[in-house]
Image (tube, rainbow, N blue to C red):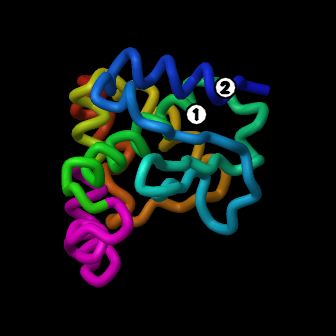
Amino acid sequence: MNNLNELRDQVISRGFPELMAEDIHVEYKKLKDALLEYGSLTEEGFYIEIDESLIDAPKEIIIGGLAHEFSHILTDKSSGKRVMSRDRFAYGISSRYKTLDERNTDFEVILRGFGKELLNFLEYSETNGYPYYKDDGLSIREVKKILGLMR
């Protein structure tokens, strides 16, 4: 089993230094239809829940998922209102906005140096029965192309 606090700290230190002072609680939980979810814990922090099916997953899979969620947290943090920002409101009511937000989130993950881990996470998700939908963000083929793994 991976130590989630250590992985959280490694990912933040390596690519998300703006989050070093944030209170971000990570834990395994039984999730209904996702491998990871995040949200506001209080006015002072955030939480990331990781599905129990990932307990024995390679750490690169969890790192890819954490980097994706940290990118979302950065967006929420920059909006200034954690509980219901305009960004989260638009995300909830507009499928087009959700698609753009998820794609931008994946681009941010790649730009911060976690492209390989994101690709591992996406491939793991697909292999384990989580189908890809356009509004989920970048596809595996797109990530491979961006990383130069596809011609």
Residue at the disc numbered 1: 62
Neighbor class of circle 2 (other Cα within 10 Å; few <14, some 14-19, many 20+) is some
Please tell me in which quadrant of the rendered image residue 57 appears: top right
The reply to whether the magenta stretch includes residue 8 is: no
Per the image, label 2 sits on a secondary structure element best described as loop
The amino acid marked with disc number 1 is Ile
Asked if residue 146 can be seen in this view, the reply is: yes
- Magenta residues span 82-104
Neighbor class of circle 1 (other Cα within 10 Å; few <14, some 14-19, many 20+) is many
Residue 45: x %, y % from top left = 46, 47
Per the image, label 1 sits on a secondary structure element best described as helix
The amino acid marked with disc number 2 is Pro
Residue 125: x %, y % from top left = 57, 48
- Report the residue that reaches farthest toward the front: 43
Residue nearer the viewer, 16 or 56: 16
Instruction: Name the residue: 29% across, 83% down.
Output: 93
